[in-house]
Amino acid sequence: MRIAVTYENGNVFPHFGHTEQFKVYEIEDGKITGSQIVDTEGSGHGALAGMLSALKADTLICGGIGAGAQTALAEEGIRLYGGVSGSADEAVDALLAGNLSYNPDVHCDHHGHEHHGEEHCHGNGHRCGEDKHGCEGNGGRCQ
């Protein structure tokens, strides 16, 4: 089993299509046996599912992700655990233990439109317009 995680500075990166790195974990007998950080080399939404397939990843942990990317992952046979934040290593440990907190209905739905004064967060203290990442697994809404 290989688990890929959108990755930045040790944490799950909040937007699949803008991730610059994946951390890929090799799993044997339910345990992490190795990991590597792989640069996406500027690949965008459309190419990332193919890249994960080429890396032989069968599972993805990420923050926000759009419907098109979800479809591409499904076509590659990659299981998706979206809406995840925090430490990448801890997320993989939680998945292996069967207690990963994720959002099965994760989506990124505010590409290309104005927010009409409606403020929302991006999970790491950023407000819309301050964050290059674009969205988050919780829909970006302030809690």
Image (tube, helix red, strand yellow):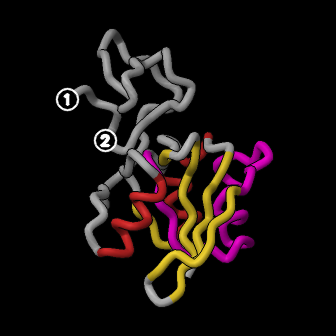
If the image is split into quadrants, where does the C terminus sit?
A: top left
The residue singled out by tag 2 in the image is: 138
Please tell me whether residue 91 is drawn above or below residue 141 in the rendered image: below
Other-residue count near label 1 (Cα within 10 Å), few / some / many at <14 / 14–19 / ≥20: few
The amino acid pointed to by label 2 is Asn
If the image is split into quadrants, where does the N terminus sit?
A: bottom right
CA distance separating discs 2 and 1: 10 Å
Q: Is residue 7 on the magenta stretch?
A: no
Q: Earlier in the sequence, mark 2 or mark 1?
A: 2
> Is residue 76 visible in the rendered structure shown here?
no
The amino acid pointed to by label 1 is Gln
Q: Residue furthest left?
A: 143
Residue 46 in picture, x, y percent from top left: 68, 53
The residue singled out by tag 1 in the image is: 143
Left or right: where does residue 17 sit relative to residue 54?
left
> Is residue 66 visible in the rendered structure shown here?
yes
Q: Secondary structure at mark 2?
A: loop
Residue at the spot 58% in from the left edge and 78% down from the top edge: 33
What are the residue bounds of the magenta stretch? 38-63
Left or right: where does residue 143 sit relative to residue 10?
left
Q: Secondary structure at mark 1?
A: loop
Residue 119 in picture, x, y percent from top left: 31, 16
Residue at the spot 57% in from the left edge and 48% down from the top edge: 7
Residue at the spot 62% in from the left edge and 44% down from the top edge: 19
Q: Residue furthest right?
A: 41
Which of the 4 quarters of the picture holds residue 86? top left
Residue 75 in picture, x, y percent from top left: 58, 73
Left or right: where does residue 106 sit relative to residue 31?
left
**CB atoms of marks 2 and 1 within 8 Å:** yes
Left or right: where does residue 52 sit relative to residue 133?
right
Residue 64 in picture, x, y percent from top left: 44, 45
Other-residue count near label 2 (Cα within 10 Å), few / some / many at <14 / 14–19 / ≥20: many
